[in-house]
């Protein structure tokens, strides 16, 4: 199995790749503006990585409720299913962007946002959470 982790955003789409080994790695983000060009680029990545499943971060509110942003993701997921016909798995993405940004040195953060680096690191966290849930690490017994 080959998984593509996705951190959806209206400006950028962060991406990560993982497989049955269980390790998520970041990919360059889709930086194209909304529209057909964006879908074409995403399709190119899906085909190049031979993705079998898509893992999308789902933005629950801090209280667990679903807000406006989640409805945007619902529309995005519906379009993913229509265009690519792959299974889509939703993973709670609460605070993943903060964790991704926190992984970058403070002095380097200013110019990084537009590059998509933070978005792809967030996608990596989302995908790694999914992979860890699928295959929890085995703890050695004493």
Image (cartoon, rainbow, N blue to C red):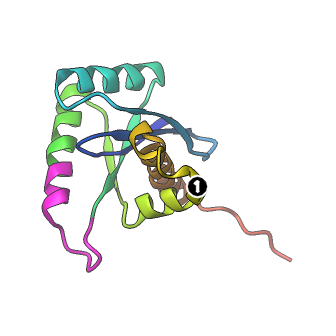
Residue 78 location (% of width, % of height)? 16, 41
Residue 128 location (% of width, % of height)? 53, 53
Task: Please give the range of residues in magenta.
Answer: 60-73
Residue 74 visible at all: yes
Residue 86 location (% of width, % of height)? 31, 33
State left or right for residue 121 relative to residue 139. Answer: left
Quadrant in the rendering for residue 39: top left
- Seen at 16% across and 27% down, the residue is 35
Residue 104 visible at all: no
SS assignment at label 1: helix
Quadrant (top left, top right, bottom left, bottom right) of the C terminus: bottom right
State left or right for residue 132 relative to residue 97. Answer: right
- Seen at 34% across and 39% down, the residue is 13
- Seen at 45% across and 54% down, the residue is 126
Whether the magenta-drawn stretch holds residue 2 is answered as no
Residue 133 location (% of width, % of height)? 50, 60
Instruction: Out of 28 and 63, give the one closest to the viewer.
Output: 28
Check disc 1 and report the residue beneath it.
107
State left or right for residue 72 relative to residue 29. Answer: left
């Amino acid at each position: 199995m080959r998984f593509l982790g996705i951190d959806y955003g209206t400006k950028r789409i962060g991406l990560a790749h993982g497989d049955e080994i269980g390790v998520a790695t970041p990919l360059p983000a889709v930086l194209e503006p909304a529209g057909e060009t964006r879908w074409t680029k995403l399709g190119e990545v899906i085909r190049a990585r031979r993705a079998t499943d898509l893992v999308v971060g789902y933005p629950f509110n801090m209280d667990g409720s679903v807000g406006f942003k989640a409805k945007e993701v619902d529309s995005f997921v519906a379009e993913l299913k229509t265009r690519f016909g792959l299974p889509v798995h939703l993973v709670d993405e609460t605070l993943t962007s903060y964790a991704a940004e926190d992984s970058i040195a403070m002095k380097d953060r200013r110019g990084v946002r537009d590059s998509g680096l933070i978005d792809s690191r967030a996608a990596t966290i989302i995908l790694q959470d999914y992979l860890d849930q699928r295959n929890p690490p085995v703890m050695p017994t004493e």
